[in-house]
Image (cartoon, rainbow, N blue to C red):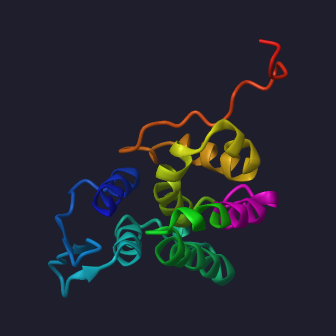
Amino acid sequence: MALRELSSLEKFLGLKKPNKYSTQGGKKVPVLQNNNGPALIGLVTIASHLIREAKRPELLGDNAEQRAVVQQWLEHRITRLDNCSKEEINIILKDLNRYLEDKVYLAGNVFTLADILMYYGIHHIVVELAIQEKERYLNVTRWFDHIQHYPGVRHHLPPVVVLRNRVYPSGNH
């Protein structure tokens, strides 16, 4: 999964020459063999490198506080979201829903790498949610839909229908 995410990130960033990746270990941690030095290991490390390579530092945050928030969400993706159990999913969605109550993006009002990688990481969960669950996590659903329609982000993932038409009350259509 991480290799497809990195390939999609490269396309989003407009990087012309695709990198060659491999994986290591049982969890298939991505590895980028860097011509200029030692191999880069890990999704966040490689993604941050690609951002710098594309000269798009704003995607890592515009100031110290934003950079810290972006790093927090990237770490959250790796430590909590990846390989979480079914029992943990509702807790993660509930916490994320609460966090997004007054925000457009994870770092406030600015689109960042945190939004891209959290979107990639949560996609398989949102695909499986019933309509009622999507409505229960309305802020997550709103954020998810916004990110999936952000130009160039959703390369390798199918679109997800997030909410039914709310014009008519249920039972009247």
Tell me which corner region of the image, top left, top right, bottom left or bottom right, holds residue 21.
Answer: bottom left
* Residue at (71, 67) in percent of width and height: 95
* 170 vs 40: above or below: above
Instruction: Identify the residue at the far top of this view.
Output: 173
Where residue 97 sits in the image (x, y, percent)? 73, 59
Image location (x, y in percent) of residue 83: 43, 69
Tell me if 20 is positioned left or right of 131 in this view. left
Q: Which residue is drawn at 35% across and 45% down?
A: 156
Left or right: where 72 falls relative to 159: right
Does residue 85 show up magenta in the picture?
A: no
For this rendering, which residue is in front, 66 or 80?
Answer: 80
Seen at 82% across and 21% down, the residue is 167
Q: Give the range drawn in magenta.
A: 93-110
Tell me where residue 2 sits by quadrant: bottom left
Question: Would you say 35 lies left or right of 165 here?
Answer: left
Q: Where residue 24 sits in the image (x, y, percent)?
A: 20, 77
As for residue 99 lying within the magenta part, the answer is: yes
Total number of numbered discs in the rendering: 0
Q: 2 or 26, which lies in front?
A: 26
Q: In this view, does 24 lie above or below 82?
A: below
Residue positioned most to the front: 87
